[in-house]
Amino acid sequence: MNPIKSYIPIYRQFIDLLVSGLSFLDEETQNELRDFVSKNQHADGGFVDRGGAADLYYSLFGFWMAEALNMEKQLESLKGFISIKKKEEHINTVDRFALMLIDLGTHHGEKPRVQLIKQLFNPDYQANFSYQLFLFLLVFDARFGRKPGLNFFVRLWLRFYRLPVGSPCSMLAAITVARVEVGLKVDIFQKQLLAYFDENSGFKAFDHLTTGDMLSTSVALFALKKSGFDMRLIAPTCLDFIQKNYAEGAFLSGDGDQTRDLEYSFYGLLALGCLADSSE
């Protein structure tokens, strides 16, 4: 089989892991999640932010959750929202990348035109550039897949790239995944990721913090799983942390914030999926 043609984009790997995460949950809990996702969809088809307004960024997480939960009605409504948003010109960079990812995902194999390079070099200075870059890479991966010519330049860049001192766990995880994708060694990066691990609360955003959070735990587990790390030693702590931060159909951020939203629900279910083969 041609490895390029059989390549699964990273965002699809996310969805597959969400499905694996659902295998941890009983039917009642799965229905609670489904109900939470449904209630967080706006009448116009988009998914809502914490203030209750339809939002492209939160719609990306709603899309991934609805796809994993086979919520066809909600996915159809989302397409209507996206078709309207594609006509708007003034959209910030993070929302634009979210729109591109949803558009690519809902076309199921088709690859609509996306103006990636133009968007990357027209950044939104109100948003974290490293996160904008992460979303750019997700869109690039979804649109173009694994191409030997492009991988050469990515490999070259990653060989010389050095993470800024004090970088968050999420950024280190992203670089680790990128190195895995182009076939570079990741042993040192795995050890660096483990420096963010807290034996009582999963992975921390920064090594000087005292407690973990759901986002950092999720992305660190994804990077470690992708890189072939044996997670059996850290699985019990992470599972306990995830379980403690489940509340009425949603996962919490894990840092004390009790607000339920789609973003952290995605991260919680993704983290569970990453541990699906490590809990025994």
Image (cartoon, grey):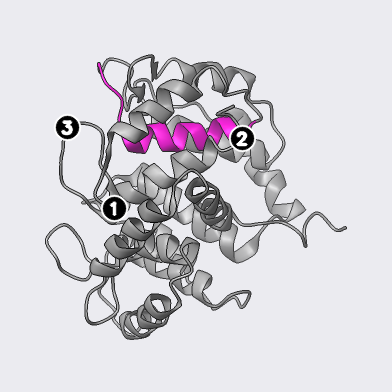
Image x and y of residue 240, in percent: 37, 27
CA gap between label 2 and label 1 equals 23 Å
Q: Residue furthest right?
A: 1
Residue 187 located left or right of residue 112: right
From the viewer's perspective, is the residue at label 1 or at label 3 nearer?
A: 1
Q: Is residue 116 visible?
A: yes
Secondary structure that dominates the magenta span:
helix
In percent of width and height, residue 5 lies at 77, 62
Nearer to the camera, 202 or 194: 202
Q: Number of labelled discs? A: 3
Disc 2 and disc 3: Cα gap in Å? 28 Å
* Residue at the left extreme of this rendering: 51
**Residue under the image location 59 percent in, 17 percent down:** 188
The answer, for residue 122, to whether it is visible in the render is no
Span shown in magenta: 210-227
Given the image, on which type of amino acid does mark 3 rest? Gly
Q: Is residue 74 above or below residue 147?
A: below
Of labels 1 and 3, earlier in sequence is 1
Q: Which residue is at the front of the view, 247 or 152?
A: 247
In the picture shown, does residue 100 fall above or below 199? below
Front: mark 2 or 3: 2
Residue 184 occupies which quadrant of the picture?
A: top right
Mark with earlier residue (2, 1): 1
* 221 falls in the magenta region: yes
Query: What amino acid is labelled 2 in the image?
Result: Asp
As drawn, the label of residue 256 is: 3
Q: Residue at x 48, y 50 (%)?
A: 22
Which disc is residue 249 wearing? Answer: 1
Q: Which mark is residue 277?
A: 2
Q: Secondary structure at mark 3?
A: loop
Residue lying at 55% horizontally and 59% vertically, measured from the top left: 140
